[in-house]
Amino acid sequence: MRKKDDEKQKCIKNAVVQLILEEGFQGASVSKIAKAAGVSPATVYIYYENKDAMLRDIYQEYTEDTISYLLQCLSPNMTGDEIIAELIRRYYYFIIENKEIFHFIEQFSGCPVLQSSCGVMRGPADLTQLLTELKRRQILNNYNNDNLYAILFSPVKSIAVKPCETEQMESERLDELIGIIQRILIKDI
C-alpha cells in the first residue's frame, strides 16, 4: 500500500472545492479532480473510498474547522453580548477569508442526500450545546436552536457576500447587525 502524503491530500481537497464550485457535484468527476490536483485517479482512491465518501469527508472536515474557528475564542466568563458579538464577527471574517470553503459548505449543506450521509458531527454538537447552555443560564431567550442558528448566522452570510465600498462601512454594517441580533436573542435587553 502506498503512503499517504498530506500535501497531495491538500491538493485533492482544493481541487474538489474548486471543481464543485465551478461544475457542481455531477461535473466534478474523480478523473477531473485528480487532474486538477495534479495526481492520478488511483492516488485519489488512496485517500478516499469513492467520490461520495470524498465529498462527505471534506465537507465534514471543513464544517468542523469552521465551527472550531467560531468557538475557539469564547470563554466561560464572557457575557451574552460578548458571545453573540464574537460568534458573529468570527463567522463574518471566516466567510471573508475563506470564500471558496464557505461556498463549498453552503452548496453541500443544500444537498439533503449528501448531508444526511454525514451523521453526527462534533463541531455542530458543540455549538448546539453552547446555545442550549446559554438558554439554560437564561442568557438567551428560549428559542428553538434551529431558529437561533438562523438568526445568528443567516444575516451574517447575507452581508459577508456583499462587500462594502469601504472598511468603515463594513465595520458599521457588522456592528449594526450585532446590535440587532443581540436585542433579538439576549434575554431582557
Image (cartoon, grey):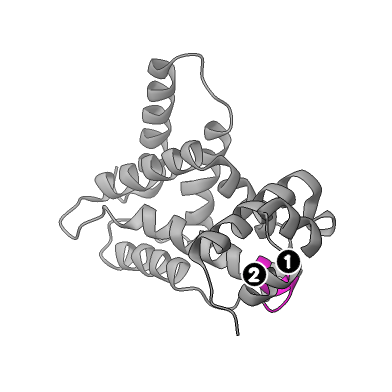
Left or right placement of residue 122 versus residue 186 in this view: right
The amino acid pointed to by label 2 is: Arg
Q: Is residue 50 magenta?
A: yes
Q: Are marks 1 and 2 in contact (CB under 8 Å)?
A: no
Decide if residue 29 is in sight here: no
- Sequence-wise, the earlier of marks 1 and 2 is 2
Task: Farthest residue to the bottom: give it.
Answer: 1
- Crowding near pointer 1: few (<14 within 10 Å), some, many (20+)? few
Task: Farthest residue to the front: give it.
Answer: 2
The answer for how far apart the CA atoms under marks 1 and 2 are is: 12 Å
Q: Name the mark nearer the viewer: 1 or 2.
A: 2
* Quadrant including the N terminus: bottom right
Magenta residues span 49-56
Q: Is residue 8 magenta?
A: no
- Relative image position of residue 66 (x, y in whole percent): 45, 55
| Res 112 label | 1
Q: Nearer the viewer, residue 47 or 74?
A: 47
Q: Which residue is mark 2?
A: 56
| Res 100 label | none
